[in-house]
Image (cartoon, rainbow, N blue to C red):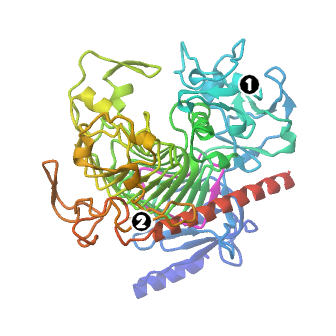
């Protein structure tokens, strides 16, 4: 193939036209082959070393156990494309899994506790799977903590929270493993409920310590009846540019695709990425990365628990604690996409079931048309470096759909535009937004933070510019009726730093809440605020000024906001005829004035985007249908069905190949 390519390149030089070859890979191939259709390579790594700009690497059906570092680049207009194979029904036939070790040699470990097993494993793995699904794997710092003489009768905040070192109250890893099967957890997030610990993690927990992998079952299962795989490292690490990854199912790595700071113009398209602490990581310095039309999921053993939280079922909240403080050390240890690059496009993806959907912390990012659902923690998280547009996304069933993080963290610039997003929570449960201020809890403004009490220095630092954050034309449906969870509250930070924080919030539909604040925002309206019941409507408002700049609805008028048609899994949030949301907004397609401030036309809306005298509040205009959001929802439902079927298939295959 090399000799043929040289001859063809001579022809290319003479003709002045580009030449693109096809390179083939098959599990039945051989890396000594030329990589042709009839004599394919055996590994993707070998094809990556041979491919030239414009080539397409066609990867046949099968399982490829590889970790690959991509250092060869394509060219502008002539990328190197790595294309997997799909079945007639769209199923992923090309599977890339990190090399791992099937763990054998299990023996009981009574020195640890009942139903604890151990097997020799020389190197600490990055990920542990059971029958093809990711299981809870205790972080190494917790595994090193010395065991206690007595176990607690129930678990509480100190079980999970706590700095490592002197005075650490975190429950050690081996003590977690020997907890009784009926142990329950109480936590301030659960209110009066107590949740069972073991069922949330599928009744199985693993950890590594000094040459052994340990597994605890809270039921009668044994490790010999299952297949445990310990895996290491990253699936694909990209140091090059102008690459396309398409139609690949990647799993079993700590990070599936890691795009390093030297890379540019890399596309991840129509892939299925699962497991690990991150599906796609984009480093600061990487540019022009596109992640589109892909399915990203944690692939956790109990995916059925990533659901709405309510007072009767807080298992998703407990799953959040386990992901963050058992699997992780205190930082959020799972994300669909971590973006700190420049010019990133994250569009049309289904980000399903995990801890965080995406960290959208890049510069000039465009996050559009994604479905983010069943995140135990956060749907979309922005940070101190975020500059970009986040729009036309559907976020449902997340602990917190939108988190504005590092409000006063170190940054070069921050400018966020959030518009035409649809946020759907349980009718009476869950937050919608949460604002986090880095200098408040851990930064220079704090003396310490003990069980919810902030102890500040006598004089706060001077106010720091926190950028500009615009939220307009979004619909927030559902959420709690009262309490600390709120539509959009930053009162604490505003008082502390003696400034109205840079939030420009208008043309939205929010669940009314007595904690929705006005004085803390530079522009606090107009928005439309609604209630579901008389109990919420009767709670005294902390800031009466809310009604002066927003349209506050009664229970009766709230019922007239939207149509009442039954939709497949979503509320119908199109404005009803005569809806109070109609003509309740300000036209953002041309310069306008609010709260005494002048604004240019804002992104996302062309002149004529509404009918009548003024635009409607919310993500949908009068006469506009829910069709695009329904289509996104149906895609997500089909993907979840596919993932459940794939999990069952993987379990059967794993046990069959044992």
Q: Which residue corresponds to the image point at 45% horizontal and 40% vertical from the top-left?
A: 535
Q: Along the polypeptide, which appears first: circle 2 or circle 1?
A: 1
Q: Which residue is mark 1?
A: 179
State whether residue 468 appears in this view: no
Residue for point 36% across, 56% down:
474
* Pick the front one: 634 or 139: 634
Q: Secondary structure at mark 2?
A: loop
Which of these two is toward me, 521 or 289?
521
Vertical order, 566 against 205 (above or below):
below
Label disc, if present, on residue 574 of the rendered structure: 2
Q: How many marks?
A: 2
User: Which span of residues is magenta-colored?
Assistant: 245-270
Q: Is residue 197 left or right of residue 495?
A: right
Residue 57 located within the stretch drawn in magenta: no
Q: Nearer the viewer, residue 176 or 434?
A: 434
Up/down of 535 relative to 326, above or below: below
Q: Residue at x 76, y 35 (%)?
A: 121
Whether residue 201 sits left or right of residue 109 in the image: it is: left
> Residue 260, image x and y in percent?
46, 50
Q: Position of residue 162 (x, y in %)?
A: 53, 21
Q: Is residue 472 above or below residue 232?
A: below
């Amino acid at each position: 193939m090399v000799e043929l390519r040289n001859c063809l390149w001579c022809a290319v030089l003479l003709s002045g036209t580009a030449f693109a070859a096809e390179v083939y890979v098959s599990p039945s191939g051989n890396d000594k082959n030329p990589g042709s259709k009839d004599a394919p390579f055996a590994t993707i790594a070998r094809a990556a070393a041979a491919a030239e700009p414009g080539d397409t690497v066609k990867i046949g059906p099968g399982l490829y156990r590889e970790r690959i570092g991509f250092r060869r680049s394509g060219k502008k207009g002539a990328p190197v494309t790595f294309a997997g194979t799909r079945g007639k029904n769209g199923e992923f036939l090309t599977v890339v899994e990190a090399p791992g070790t099937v763990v054998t040699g299990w023996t009981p470990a009574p020195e640890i506790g009942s139903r604890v097993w151990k097997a020799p494993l020389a190197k600490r793995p990055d990920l542990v799977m059971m029958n093809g699904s990711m299981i809870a794997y205790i972080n190494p710092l917790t595994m090193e903590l010395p065991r206690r003489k007595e176990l607690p009768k129930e678990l509480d905040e100190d079980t999970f929270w706590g700095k490592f070192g002197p005075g650490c109250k975190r429950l050690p890893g081996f003590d977690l493993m020997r907890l009784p099967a009926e142990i329950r957890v109480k936590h301030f997030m659960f209110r009066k409920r107590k949740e069972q610990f073991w069922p949330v993690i599928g009744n199985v927990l693993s950890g590594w310590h000094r040459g052994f992998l340990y597994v605890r079952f809270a039921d009668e299962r044994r490790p010999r009846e299952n297949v445990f795989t310990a895996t290491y490292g990253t699936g694909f690490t990209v140091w090059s540019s102008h690459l396309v990854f398409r139609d690949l199912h990647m799993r079993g790595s700590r990070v599936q695709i890691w795009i390093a700071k030297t890379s540019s113009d890399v596309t991840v398209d129509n892939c299925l990425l699962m497991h690990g602490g991150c599906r796609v990581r984009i480093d600061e310095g990487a540019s022009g990365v596109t992640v589109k039309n892909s399915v990203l999921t944690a692939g956790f053993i109990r995916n059925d628990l990533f659901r709405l939280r309510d007072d009767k079922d807080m298992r998703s909240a407990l799953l959040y604690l386990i992901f963050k403080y058992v699997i992780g050390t205190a930082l959020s240890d799972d994300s669909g996409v971590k973006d700190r690059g420049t010019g990133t496009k994250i569009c049309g993806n289904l980000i399903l079931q995990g801890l965080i959907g995406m960290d959208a912390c890049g510069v000039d990012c465009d996050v559009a048309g994604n479905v983010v659902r069943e995140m135990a923690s956060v749907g979309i998280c922005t940070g101190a470096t975020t500059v970009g547009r986040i729009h036309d996304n559907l976020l449902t069933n997340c602990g917190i759909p939108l988190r504005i993080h590092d409000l006063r963290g170190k940054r070069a610039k921050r400018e966020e535009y959030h518009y035409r997003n649809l946020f759907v929570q349980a009718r009476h449960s869950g937050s919608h937004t949460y604002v986090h201020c880095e200098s408040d809890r851990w930064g220079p403004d704090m003396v310490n933070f003990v069980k919810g009490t902030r102890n500040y220095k006598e004089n706060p630092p001077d106010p720091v510019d926190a950028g500009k954050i615009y939220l307009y034309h979004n619909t927030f449906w559902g959420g709690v009726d009262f309490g600390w969870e709120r539509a959009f509250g930053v009162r604490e930070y505003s008082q502390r730093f003696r400034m109205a924080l840079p939030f420009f919030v208008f043309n939205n539909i929010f669940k009314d809440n007595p904690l929705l604040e006005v004085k803390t925002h530079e522009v606090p309206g107009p928005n439309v605020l609604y209630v579901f019941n008389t109990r919420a409507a009767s709670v005294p408002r902390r800031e009466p000024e809310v009604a002066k700049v927003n349209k506050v609805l009664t229970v009766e008028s709230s019922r007239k906001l939207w149509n009442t048609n039954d939709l497949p899994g979503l509320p119908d949030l199109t404005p009803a005829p005569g809806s109070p949301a109609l003509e309740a907004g300000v036209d953002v397609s041309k310069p306008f004035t609010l709260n005494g401030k002048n604004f240019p036309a804002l992104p996302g809306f062309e002149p004529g985007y509404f009918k009548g005298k003024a635009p409607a509040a919310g993500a949908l205009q009068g006469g506009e249908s829910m069709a695009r959001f329904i289509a996104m929802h149906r895609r997500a439902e089909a993907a979840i069905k596919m993932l459940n079927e794939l999990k069952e298939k993987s379990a059967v295959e794993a046990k069959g190949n044992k």
